[in-house]
Amino acid sequence: MLQDLERQKTTGGDAPGQPTGGLSQRAGAFASAMRQRWNSRVTFSLPVKLLIITGVFVMIAQILIFLPALASFRVNWLNDRINTALVSALAADAVPGREVPPALRNELLRTALVRAIAVRRGGARRVILPPVQEINIDVTYDMRQPVRLTLMDQVSLRLHHIGDALDVMRSDGERTMRVIGLVGPRFDDVIEIVMPEEPLQRAMWRYGTEIFWLSLFVALATAALVYFAINQLLVKPIRKLSRNIVDYSENPEDPTRVVVPSGRSDEIGRAEEELAHMQRQLSLLLKQKTRLAQLGLAVSKINHDLRNMLANAQLISDRLADSSDPTVQRVAPKLIASLDRAINFCNETLRFGRTEETTLRREVFALKPLVEEVVGTLPLKPGGQVIFDIDVDPALMVDADRGHLYRIFSNLARNAVQAIEAGDDPSAGGRVTVGGRRDNETTVVVVSDTGPGVPARAREKLFQPFQGSTRRGGTGLGLPISAELAQLHGGSLKLLDTATGAAFELRIPDRSARPVP
């Protein structure tokens, strides 16, 4: 994880004085791409698409209403002609001798808008008002309807009427129609009228034009209302979210650019809340990465000077090796070894800052002497009562990098001592136990203590840099560094569940078990 965080610093070819340039460049490129996509879609934005789609579907609905209405108008118009013709036929029958004068006949035909009227009753057909001249019938429409119709029959009849209405609308208007209608309770008692198609066609076009403009007005009004409602409820909040995403991408570290939820209880409200939560988390993460990058740059500078000072100290300590003082002879090797480890650590830190993989120098060596060396260098308080119990077989061997394993045990042992000394009763002391064993081709070491244990709130982020420290003034880097070094060996470091205290299990597999690349 530390390598990923530091790699963020150097990615993108940043200068040493600009550790966050790569992040800023990528954020700016993303924002520019979002703006270009936004600007390229302004012409076909969501409100425009919504308005067009709403209008089209409302017009389709109006068309589905228009056709049955036009068919009903035709049926009603023809029925009106039948009723008017029936009145004219009754008037003609009232003439004495049923001899209708030509002037009266023409007037009756003109009033009914027909050319001839015939009635059939009881199977006998009689022409009431004959035509003035011979007529050729082009089309016949039977307006009689059965008393009882099933649902399918009703649908079929309406479709038939719609077809007849469209046939009239697209004809040339020069045809002559014969229309049949009922005049009595019997289905065979009918009246037949002969009339030109042109008056019906003209009336249907006039009605259709009125219905068209009315339908267009209703469609536009409905589309506008639907558009306004959907635009207020959905489109505006969605566009607001889109603009916020674009604005936020320009400067993700600015907390003022985080979306403010509107408090809605629907899906958009939940999306706003989730987006706000995600943006806050991302802003926090970016700030942390920026600080880590800046910290890495500062550490690199400090490390360079520290390495020079340690080199000078190493030269001085080398002269101590020539001293004949027994105390110096006993302490000098440990001092020299510690300085060597410190210098190597500085060199590895510089390689780490350049995102170079740390080189493992694995070797097979006895584990117990290394643990004893770590315990001997711990800064124990004078008069302290912390007892170390090293339960490691002297014959137990481990295949690892000696320097890395020293750092792991040093971090674990220091944490255990600090946990005991920071307990409720430091004078009571405590015990730190280091146990080792072999598990097939893996060396397993458990470092446990009798301290207060790891708080529940710290367990989730225990191995995250700067976040897992439970001690005031702690950096929270010891365990993350130790876990990364263990993973570098192909092993693992984890916290075990214990009733009291804390216990960490370190697993280091042999090279034969898991070759390290």
Image (cartoon, rainbow, N blue to C red):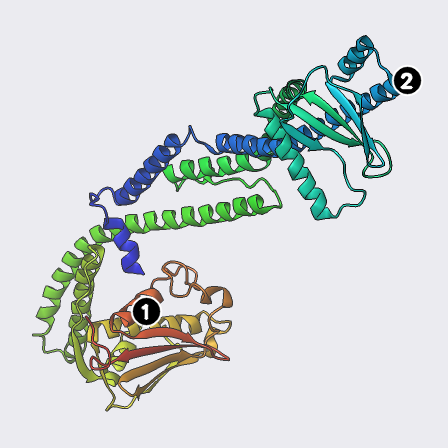
Are discs 1 and 2 less than 8 Å apart at CB?
Answer: no
Check disc 2 and report the residue beneath it: 97
Q: Which residue is drawn at 27% across and 59% down?
A: 3
- The image quadrant of residue 439 is bottom left
What amino acid is found at the position of numbered circle 2 in the picture? Gly
- The image quadrant of residue 54 is top right
SS type, badge 1 = helix
The percent position of residue 427, horizontal first and vertical second, equals 46, 76
SS type, badge 2 = helix
Comes first in the chain, label 1 or label 2: 2
Gap in Å between the C-alphas at discs 1 and 2?
123 Å
Q: Which residue is drawn at 9% across and 78% down?
A: 324
The percent position of residue 289, horizontal first and vertical second, equals 34, 50
Q: Residue 98 carries which label?
A: none
Check disc 1 and report the residue beneath it: 483
Q: Residue at x 19, y 61 (%)?
A: 346
- Nearer-the-camera pick, 342 or 182: 182
Badge 2 crowding class, 10 Å Cα cut-off, few under 14, some 14 to 19, many 20 or more, is few
Horizontal arrangement in the rendering, residue 476 relative to residue 83 (left or right): left
